[in-house]
Image: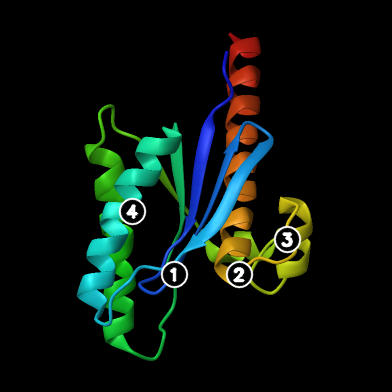
Amino acid sequence: MTAKIVLALDASTTAIGWCVGQGERYLNSDTYRPPGECAEARILALARWLVDIVTTYDPDLVAIEKPMGHHGNLRTDRLLARVGGIAEGVCRTMDPPVDVVYIHPIHVKQTPFHKHATLAAANYAGKDSVSGDEADAIGVWHVALGEIRAQAFRNRISEEET
């Protein structure tokens, strides 16, 4: 059985951190900054980029950091929700559709890789530096891996009980 390919995203309207891994193996990560002065143009560019990256890596699962809290600006909250909806829409309309899970930010902060630990994330990725968005995406990937491991464990226990 081939290990699952997971694409992890830390999405916003100005930058999207991403990380790809296959099973336990880290493959690549970076930050995409969409062009455009207005949010609408950036969101459209993000949608196009998402189609390209999902097509390129052909993930079995896309893990997205869930937008949480109140950012002090309702417009920002609405835009973040749109970005998440677009990411999920792109994944669900691929042929075949790609499964999507949302990862709570507190779980990302509990990993060694998040926007306040960019040095650890850069060391893990073998890079001189990474953005906070890229570090968060690496953390999202690690949380998704933990979920996959936990599900496999539950499945094994369930099979042993039957």
Dot 1 or dot 3: first in sequence order is 1
Dot 1 or dot 2: first in sequence order is 1
Name the foreground residue: 93 vs 66: 93
- The residue that mark 4 highlights is 49
Name the foreground residue: 38 vs 161: 38
Residue 135 at x, y percent in the picture: 63, 63
Which label number is shown at residue 131?
2
What secondary structure is found at the residue carrying circle 3?
helix
The quarter of the rendered structure image containing the C terminus is: top right
What distance separates the C-alpha of mark 2 from that of mark 4?
A: 18 Å
Dot 3 or dot 2: first in sequence order is 3
What distance separates the C-alpha of mark 1 from that of mark 2?
A: 10 Å
What distance separates the C-alpha of mark 3 from that of mark 2?
A: 9 Å
| Amino acid found under the numbered disc labelled 2 | Ser
Proximity of marks 3 and 4: CB atoms separated by less than 8 Å: no
Dot 2 or dot 4: first in sequence order is 4
Q: Residues within 10 Å of mark 4 (few under 14, many from 20)?
A: some
What secondary structure is found at the residue carrying circle 1?
loop
| Amino acid found under the numbered disc labelled 1 | Ala
| Residue displayed at 60% across by 66% down | 106
Proximity of marks 1 and 2: CB atoms separated by less than 8 Å: yes
- The residue that mark 3 highlights is 122
| Amino acid found under the numbered disc labelled 4 | Trp
Residue 12 at x, y percent in the picture: 40, 70
| Residue displayed at 28% across by 82% down | 37
Dot 3 or dot 4: first in sequence order is 4
Q: Residues within 10 Å of mark 2 (few under 14, many from 20)?
A: many
Dot 1 or dot 4: first in sequence order is 1
- 94 vs 98, left or right, is left
